[in-house]
Image: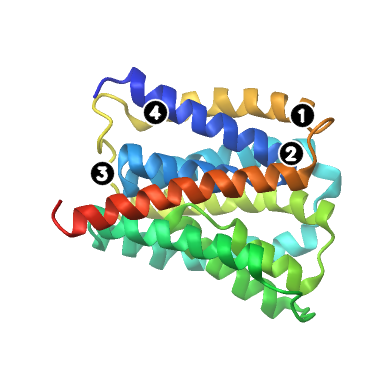
Amino acid sequence: MTVLGPLLIIAGAVLIGTVLQRVSGSGVGLVVAPVLSILLGPALGVLVTNMATMVSGFLIMLAVWSRIDWRRFRTLGPVTVIGAVPGAWLVGQLSAGWLSIILGAIVLCALLITVSLPRLPHWEGRRVDVVSGVLGGFFNTTSGVAAPVMVICARLSRWDQQSFAATMQPLFMTMGAASVVTKLLLGSVDEVGQTGDLHLGLLFGAIVAIVLLGIVLGGQLTKVVSPARARTLAMALAGLGALGALIRGTWQVLGG
């Protein structure tokens, strides 16, 4: 596979995900992880997704700084590392087929839970944030998708939507960094994978440029597109990608 083809697909997925995240507060992991899992393989695809969420979270954080709830971030952020470590270990133990199945299943189940749950009971306190942070770190490391876990956390605690969407940006940045570092330290991911001559340094530079473009476009779209519509589109794209990853993984496990 030549470098240009994968790079264009990665750029398109990251651009769409960043635009949706700028408008609604989430989108990069949901959109990018299933697509890159199919393109690059689940281990490397999720690693690149983690890189994208790290960059997008940092850059969007600068735009929404005044609305971030730093008190809650100080509780949620550090515990995501606790979940990232076993997640990174698991990624290194499973075959590509099983990783694709797990990624697809996690994304599909998370989407179903997010859209079908009735009004949840009102729970507050550090325990909700700690449990959500650990689970978010684990799911982000294994599947690249932590937003549904955090949405459930927000519903339980009745977290204001504007504050929640803003606070997710430094949290996504922290989760992405924890996932990348733990997987590289544990040697969980083959850095070359299915990309031929496309290496992580080139990928990272391209991601930074595409995320910057996505933030600019997303900032303009916030004037005409509601957060609810952006979330709906992100979930629809994520569902299609997750279904594709699930089918691919099942085919690989069955020896197709």
- Number of other residues with Cα within 10 Å of mark 1, as a class: few under 14, some 14 to 19, many 20 or more: some
Distance from disc 1 to disc 2, alpha carbons, whole Å, reads 7 Å
Q: Which mark is residue 23?
A: 2
Disc 3 from disc 2: Cα separation: 33 Å
- Considering every residue shown, the one lying at the far left of the view is 255
Foreground mark, 1 or 3, reads 1
Work out how far the residue at label 1 is from the one at label 4, CA to CA, in angstroms.
30 Å
Q: Amino acid at mark 4?
A: Gly
- For image coordinates 63% across by 64% down, the residue present is 114
- The tag earlier along the polypeptide, 1 or 4, is 4
Relative placement, left or right, of 81 versus 40 is right
- Element under disc 4: helix
Q: Residue drawn at (24%, 24%), measured in percent from left and top? A: 1
Q: Position of residue 65 (x, y in %)?
A: 80, 43
Q: Secondary structure at mark 2?
A: helix
For marks 1 and 3 on the same chain, the one whose residue lies earlier in the sequence: 3
Check disc 3 and report the residue beneath it.
190
Dot 2 surroundings within 10 Å: few (below 14), some, or many (20 or more)? Answer: many
Q: CA distance from mark 3 to mark 4?
A: 14 Å
Query: 164 and 111: which one is in front?
Result: 111
Q: Residue at x 78, y 78 (%)?
A: 124
